Structures are given as structure tokens and as C-alpha cells.
Image: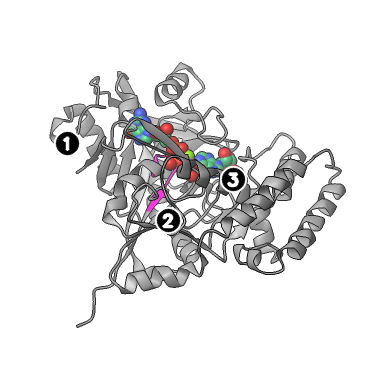
Amino acid sequence: MTMKQGKVDALLGIVFGDEGKGKVVDYFTPRYDVVARFAGGPNAGHTIIFEGKKFVLRSIPSGIFDEGKVNIIGNGCVIAPDLFMAEAQELETAGYTLTNRLHISRRAHLILPTHRVLDRAYEAAKGKNKVGTTGKGIGPTYSDKAARVGLRVGDILENFEEKYQTLKARHEQILRDLHFTDYDIADEEKKWLEGIEYMKKFPLTDTEFEINRALEQGKNVLAEGAQGSLLDIDHGTYPYVSSSSTTAGGVCTGLGVAPNRIGRIFGIFKAYSTRVGGGPFVVELFDETGDTIRHIGNEYGAVTGRNRRCGWLDLVALKYAIMINGVTDLVMMKSDVLDDFETIKVCTAYTKDGVTVTDMPYDTEGWQPVWEDVPGWHTPLSELRNEKDFPKKFADYIAYIERATGTPISIVSVSPDREATIIR
Ligand code: GDP
Ligand code: IMO
Ligand code: MG
């Protein structure tokens, strides 16, 4: 008898990030054997709140709080040894043992201190049109990967010092060419080299084999997305994007699993929209309503503390992301943030110069939203734990989005807490 093979389900942010991925991955972890990050690095900030404690994870998968599960940082990720060490030590201090259940791909790329300087230098050179990066060296690290000069985790184990000095010298040359010389990485570099030593405590392995073997044994894997589909290097609002494949295709390349291993694709979004950093944001509200959403939703960056830009739900973007990712299930977060609104607006189309579109345009700059009004529910949602207790108008809002997108909303979240996750 052959054993039934396991599947890789994916949980993907399908807007501009910060949808609540950390919370849902943590909630889902008991159903899976392995949780794996496949893209991004410490630009991510995934918040998990339970039993009155709050953790913000950047590189470590959000499955780490379930002691029985293996967590993997996959080959598609980039990792900063100093930040990784700080993050891991914080968890160790909180009582979680990590070393034998957090595995790092040898193919993941290392973020050097000079990558972070380059990130700043490239941003400075952009003048007005800054991407508004997190400053974590993400773009320069993925650029070196594509340029075939990057350092990988596996390099730590052999002739590391020489390889490090070579890449650092290359970066210093670029910085001189850019006349960006007013930086000092001495302290940072010391921590970073400590981080390199610290990483050796963890299994630095060929995680693609690990994952595929687990699948052959009938185990199930949850791929934890980072960022969001509209920040994807190919499908996002280029050039105002991150530098990795944050969409479903990235699960395959970022973990080394074949497309036919993928099971369900959970597309996570908020009941409204946010964006942090630069770039076009069609549904952005510049008025008091935007400020109210930011205030109630506590929309300040988990990593950088920056104000998140706020707006109403964008169906054009949502439908596009559902298409690109093959979303099977939607997950709607932060519904409670809209509790007090008389009327809620939803963007159903974009318009510019007399042209109206419902397909995501090539360039989203300069488009205006076409709004449709939906009645608010005026009832506090955050204590609810069962769908049958939903106020009618909230149930109507869910049904409206399902109809418009042709995709079921399988999970609804009504407060930051782990328990406030309602499966439908
Ligand atoms: P991620 O990057 O996708 O993991 O999301 P972030 O952690 O950056 O941002 C999501 C924020 O929303 C965090 O502060 C969460 O604690 C919070 N959050 C998650 N779900 C809910 C919810 O249903 N209601 C409210 N009010 N907050 C939530
Ligand atoms: P999580 O996983 C929200 C944004 C930055 C910037 C752009 C490029 O927490 O949802 P980068 O540093 O990646 O080169 O920045 O992408 N960005 C995010 N926005 N959530 C994130 O991650 C993000 N990661 C990057 O603000 O606009
Ligand atoms: Mg975040």
C-alpha cells in the first residue's frame, strides 16, 4: 500500500502586506507538521498575540510557538545573521527552545551589513521617488543573488572570511562610486559576525529534501507568505515593490516543491486596505476617515513604526491577487476595526481620463477609485467566536465580497488574539 502524500498549503498576504499573516499561521500550526517561510527576510514583521504576550517575528516562521513542529527558513529567503540572532535569543529568553526544530536552507542568501548601507544609498539616490524600503538590505541582497555574487548560508561553513571580504569590498567600491561614504558599520559588523557563529547552532541543511521527504511521508506543510502580492517583484506595483516572489509561484521556487504538491491557497486581506512605504495606492484616504482607520486599526509598522497609509477595501486589487495566486480560500482580518462606521465604502473599479477598468492596470499611478457604499454593522465584533452571532450587516459585507470575488471567505478574524479566529 502506498502512503498518501502530504500537501503544501500556502497562506499568502494578497495586498500590500501586514494583513495578519503571523496571527493566522500561528493559529493554523496545529494542523501542520512543518511551517516554512519561502520569501523575504527581516523586512517582514509578523505579530502574534496569545495569553497576553506579544511577539513580532521577522525571519523565524510563525509556527515556532508550537513546540512539536519543525520550522524552516527556505531557500527563497534572505537572512541577516545579527537580526536573526536577536530574534532567536528573544524567543529563547521567553522559554522556547529552537535549535533542533528551526532549520535553515543552505541556499538562503545572507544580508551583509553593507547590503543595508547600499539599501540606504540607493534610496537616497532615488530622490523624490523613494520606494520607502524597510532599510533591511533586501533589494541589494536579492540583486546580488540574481547577479550571482551573493553569499549563501552554506558559505558560512567553508572559507567564509575570504568570501565575506570579497563581497564587502565589492559593496564598498559601489558605495565609493555613489559618493556614499559617510557610514560606519564597525559595531554592526561585530554583531553580524557573532550572528554568523550563532547560526551554526542550527541545522543548516538542504531544506528542499527535508520538505519533499516530509510530503512523501504524508506530512503536511504550511508555507507562510511574507509581504503581499502587490509587493511582488513581478506582479506588484513595480518599482514600488519588494524584491522577492511573494505570490504562489514563489512557494515552489522558494521551497523547492513542485506545483502539483500545492494544496489550498489561503489569501489573507484586511476588511480595509493599508500600504506602508512609497508608491501608488488608489484607495488611499487622505481625510479624517483614513486617520480614524489608522487609529482604530493601530496601523503603525511592526518593523519600522511608520504610519501605514489607510483606505477602504479594493476589489480590483483583490480580484487580481486571487487570479495570480489561485486563491482557494479568503481570510478576512481586522473586521472589528470597521465596527463604528455608518457606511463602508468598497472600490469596485478604477477610473482615469474617462476610462474605467476593473482589471488591475499596468501602472496604478493616477487612477481614482470608483466607490460603492455598503451599510456598516454598528456592533462590536471582537468578542464574537461564532459565525451565527454575526450581525446581519456584517454577514452581508462578507457575502458581498464573496460574490464580487467568486471566492469563499473561510476564516474571519475579529481581534488580534489567537482565539478570535472564526472558521466558517
Ligand atoms: P503580518 O505582517 O501580515 O503578519 O501582519 P502584522 O503583524 O504586520 O500586522 C497585523 C496587525 O493586526 C498586528 O498588530 C496584529 O496583532 C493585528 N491583528 C491581527 N488580526 C486582527 C484582528 O482581527 N483585529 C484587530 N483589531 N487586529 C488584528
Ligand atoms: P509583512 O511580511 C508591509 C514594503 C516596504 C516598501 C517595499 C520595499 O510584515 O507583511 P523592502 O525593504 O522589502 O525592500 O521594501 O515593501 N514592505 C512591506 N510592507 N509589510 C511587509 O512585510 C513589508 N515588507 C516590505 O514598506 O514599501
Ligand atoms: Mg507585518
Q: Residues within 10 Å of mark 2 (few under 14, many from 20)?
A: some
Marked residue nearer the N-terminal end (1 or 2): 2
Q: Which residues are magenta?
A: 11-21
Q: What predominant SS class does the magenta segment belong to?
A: loop
Q: Disc 3 to disc 2, how far (Cα)? A: 32 Å
Marked residue nearer the N-terminal end (3 or 2): 3
As drawn, 390 above or below 260: above
Q: How is the image coloured?
A: one colour
Residue behind mark 1: 387
Residue behind mark 3: 83
Q: Quadrant of residue 338?
A: top left
Q: Secondary structure at mark 1?
A: helix
Q: Residues within 10 Å of mark 3 (few under 14, many from 20)?
A: some
| Residue 97 image offset from top left, x and y in percent | 42, 50
The quadrant of the picture occupied by the N terminus is: bottom left
| Residue 189 image offset from top left, x and y in percent | 72, 47
Residue located at (28% from left, 49% from top):
407
